Amino acid sequence: MTITLERAEQAYCRVRDVVPRVEWATMADDVEAIFRLKQERNAIILAHNYMTPEIFHGVADITGDSLALARQAVDVDADVIVLAGVHFMAETAKLLNPAKTVLIPDPLAGCSLAESITPEDVRALRAQHPGVPVVTYVNTSAAVKAESDICCTSGNAEQIIAGLGVDRVIMIPDQYLAANIAARTGVEVITHPGSCEVHERFTADDIRQIRADHPGVDVIAHPECPPAVVAAADFAGSTADMVDYVARKRPGQVALITECSMSDNVAQLYPDVKFVRPCNLCPHMKRNTLSVIRRALETMTHEVTIDASVAESARAAVARMLQPGLWKDKAVTA
Ligand code: 13P
Ligand code: SF4
């Protein structure tokens, strides 16, 4: 057995509870090639929690929510970063690693939130609300980040909004995340009519049905869900907060109100927990497959570049969210 075959077999051990052996047989060749190419290219794979298990547990080097991927991207010791996720995540990795090659396996992996807002929209909001700080969700383009004072993710939004110490903020572009954070912090939030096409489809009736069908189930919702869904849940948090909740509480049954691969990935780690699976698929995240990741490493495509005219300001907005000490620097209008 070659070293790579050993690696593919080790990778299988990490997914065997959620990927049948017969399916793995169709994946092993790509897995072996990816391990070989990572070594040849001195590359690492950063994978979001919504990747399918064969990517998440099989070939990824670093996994997590948007915040963890941004944080970990800062310390990456490799020449090449493959971002198995969506385009804004790859742009964030590039902003934090301007000297490294950052690849997005499929450049069409977008996000309904990122597509909902333009830099002109941000400038118009600023003109309507002079002096009000602009907090921008990382699910946006670099050009939109460049118009912002500070970024946030679902993992730190509450902390950042509360930490600004102001009564009003412009929080864009997710109207539901903004409403959920306003409810938790008491800060008045001016927002934008963007939404996540995956999470906006969940309803409070879905939660009632899950509770009726699975008495005693713990329901955890992503804060991109509408406020009525978050209110009906037991807990709301980022995808990393969801993993943490299951790890700490070990509920008998849990429903993760989010993208489908989350339950598969967490179920592999906690076989004692029963996962109720009322999920919606993200078509953008699902553009990442083993074969497109392999092709990205073989051909060194698609390289992420950021327009020099926006890179510096966008990087500053991301850096402020990663270094809380910078929240109150003079560039933040609060
Ligand atoms: P997290 O930051 O919670 O992982 O969310 C990212 C995302 O795209 C959710 O839809
Ligand atoms: Fe965007 Fe929603 Fe997909 Fe996340 S799940 S990448 S917010 S469309």
Image (spheres, rainbow, N blue to C red):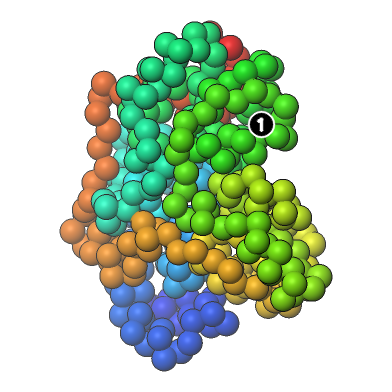
Residue 40, visible in the rendered structure? no
The residue drawn where x is 45% and y is 68% is 52
Q: Is residue 128 above or below residue 219?
A: above
Residue 330, visible in the rendered structure? yes
Residue 256 located left or right of residue 192:
right
Q: Nearer the viewer, residue 72 or 105?
A: 105
Residue 235 located left or right of residue 173:
right
| Quadrant housing residue 275 | bottom right
Residue 29 located left or right of residue 220:
left
The residue drawn where x is 38% and y is 17% is 123
| Quadrant housing residue 256 | bottom right
Classed neighbour count for the residue bearing mark 1: other residues with Cα under 10 Å, few (<14), some (14–19), many (≥20): many
Q: Position of residue 315 (x, y in %)?
A: 41, 27
Q: Is residue 264 above or below residue 166?
A: below
Residue 104 located left or right of residue 218:
left
Q: Nearer the viewer, residue 136 or 95?
A: 136
The residue tagged 1 is 182
Q: Quadrant of the N terminus?
A: bottom left
Q: Position of residue 171 (x, y in %)?
A: 53, 28
